[in-house]
Amino acid sequence: MIRFFSPCCSMVLLNYLARKHTESGLVAGITISVPWDARKSSDSMEEPLNWLLFNRHITRCLHRAVTRHRKILEKVVDVDYVLKARSIREFDERYTSLMFGYSSCMDYYRDASPGKKLPNTAVPILCLNAADDPFSPQTAFPVSIVQDLPNVALVLTAHGGHIAFLQGFFPRGENYMERLFGQFVHAVFEHQEEMKQACGIREEQMKD
């Protein structure tokens, strides 16, 4: 089985692959625009332009989600305090980190960030990121870590934004992201042995 996940779910996927190591039940994974460091992503979202374009809107969406389930959530959090959050970070401090049992937002961000956990993964992984992605700043890309990992390929493009990767002056039809995904899936299922060999994965490793 292979899994393709959206950005936030990609963080969950990579953390899962690192935690389960050879017992993930997956033969490969691919991520698109994954935020490698939650704290740095939050910092990027608080830059003036990004706050106006993204942070404020996302925070309002989070407010609406909490308001929809107010009767249930007010039993475990101070909903009025949560709804006063003016940024994603404030929302995470007042709601997300508490709901997941963390003592602080920084602890939550540290645990959610998958970059430094990549050495614990044991299946072929393809990661696509763009240098101009405001949700995943270039300073967080784990380039030095990936250089020592035969099972992880980090594909970086100068442009592509956040899960865009459009091509041509009139970007219609298949885009770069879709083409790369198709090629990777084909390689994983049609050339499994060659893929394992290239990634330094032995059968006995997967059975341990």
Image (cartoon, helix red, strand yellow):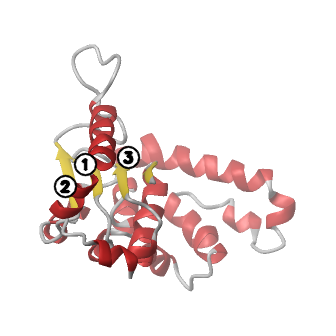
Disc 3: which residue: 50
Toward the viewer: 148 or 157?
148
Residue at 22% x, 66% y is: 142
Mark 1 crowdedness (10 Å alpha carbons): few <14, some 14-19, many ≥20:
few
- Secondary element at tag 3: helix
Q: Residue furthest bottom?
A: 103
User: Are dots 2 and 3 in contact, CB under 8 Å?
Assistant: no
Quadrant placement of the N terminus? bottom left
Q: Which amino acid does label 2 sit on?
A: Glu
* Residue under the point 68% across and 65% down: 82
The amino acid sitting under disc 1 is: His
Name the N-terminal-most of marks 2 and 3: 3
Residues at badges 1 and 2 in contact (C-beta under 8 Å)? Answer: yes
Q: Is mark 1 on a helix, strand or loop?
A: loop
Which residue in the structure is indicated by mark 1?
A: 191
Q: In whole angstroms, how far apart are the C-alphas of marks 2 and 3? A: 43 Å
* Residue 80 found in image quarter: bottom right
Q: Measured from the top left, where is residue 171 in percent x and y?
A: 30, 18
Mark 1 touching mark 3, by CB under 8 A? no
Which residue, as the protein is rendered here, is positioned at the far top?
A: 170
What x and y, as percent, mark residue 24?
46, 69
Residue 71 x %, y % = 87, 61
Query: Which marked residue is nearer to the observer: mark 2 or mark 3?
Result: 2
Element assignment for label 2: helix
